[in-house]
Amino acid sequence: MFKHRSHNKELLDESKIPRELLYQNLKELETINKYLGGHSVSLNGLNAIDINKLEVTNIIDIGCGGGDSLKAMAKWARTHGHNIKFTGVDLKQDCISYAQNNCKRYTEINFSCTDFNMAFTKISNINVVHASLFFHHFSESEIIDFIKLCNTNNALLIINDLERNFLAYYSIKLLTKLFSNSTLVKNDAPLSVLRGFKKAEWVEILNRAGIKKFSIKNRWAFRHLIIAYPNGK
């Protein structure tokens, strides 16, 4: 079951999800990211790059969901004195509406309801692309194509996603069974692990995308932190 990644679709991938179910899912995902270290992985990524040297002024978060990663990153930027604009990108208007309310205290955060592959067309001057718990929803070829797009547009990519393994699967299955009130979270969280990648698979993906400089590190709560530098930097 863990040797090869699953290609079964998650409930969250459905085009029409009742708003109350979606909002419960987004609320619980924020709690999971906050208390199980998901946000800290993304912030580790920001700390690992030289914001000033790379002249980072605009970060987008693809598949932004409820906006919780954006809040964490905006708070980090304020704390470190970085003048950065953030844009959340999501295909679901209900997610955008939820995120706008969730991030209303952060004027540096804006949103775009669009497909992530159109981000560079819709948003100008993107320096960094952030993706948390996002790429496991897609095929290897789709991920490779987007990494190539980031490289073409000279944008650094920070990926925060799940590692596919036995412990991660059964841990999240038990935790969601005990504490989750969301049918989407209970179904999708274990499946997300099965759809995740092993480190060697990420290496292959990045190599196939033509990325020359990257790092892949294991982080708490069975996560990978991947930083892919555009070949021009």
Image (spheres, helix red, strand yellow):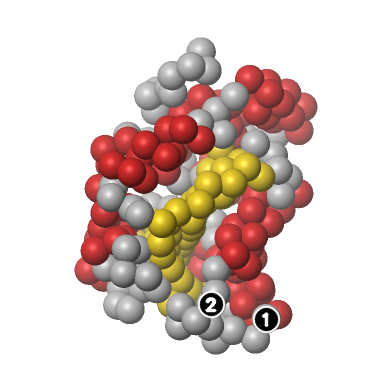
- Would residue 179 appear left or right of 33 to someone viewing this image? right
Residue 217 sits above or below residue 79 on the image? above
Asked if residue 4 shows in the view, the reply is yes
Give me the residue at 65% from left, 86% from top: 81
Image position, residue 125 (x, y; %): 33, 78
Give me the residue at 64% from left, 53% from top: 41
Q: Residues within 10 Å of mark 2 (few under 14, many from 20)?
A: some
Image position, residue 42 (x, y; %): 60, 58
Looking at the rendered structure, the kind of residue marked 1 is: His
Helix, strand or loop status at disc 2: loop
Image position, residue 190 (x, y; %): 58, 26
Give me the residue at 66% from left, 74% from top: 75
Asked if residue 64 shows in the view, the reply is no
Alpha carbon of mark 2 to alpha carbon of mark 1: how far? 10 Å
Residue 97 sits above or below residue 192 on the image? below
Give me the residue at 32% from left, 34% from top: 139
> Image quarter for residue 59?
bottom left
Image position, residue 87 (x, y; %): 44, 70
> Image quarter for residue 4?
top left
Q: Earlier in the sequence, mark 2 or mark 1?
A: 2
Looking at the rendered structure, the kind of residue marked 2 is: Ile
Which residue is identified by label 2? 51
Does the CB distance between marks 2 and 1 fall below 8 Å? yes
- Report the mark closest to the observer, 2 or 1: 2
- Would residue 174 appear left or right of 227 to someone viewing this image? right
Residue 190 sits above or below residue 26 on the image? above
**Quadrant where the C terminus lies?**
bottom left
**Label ID, residue 80:** 1
Helix, strand or loop status at disc 1: loop
Q: Residue furthest top?
A: 1
Q: Residue furthest front?
A: 212
Q: Residues within 10 Å of mark 1 (few under 14, many from 20)?
A: few
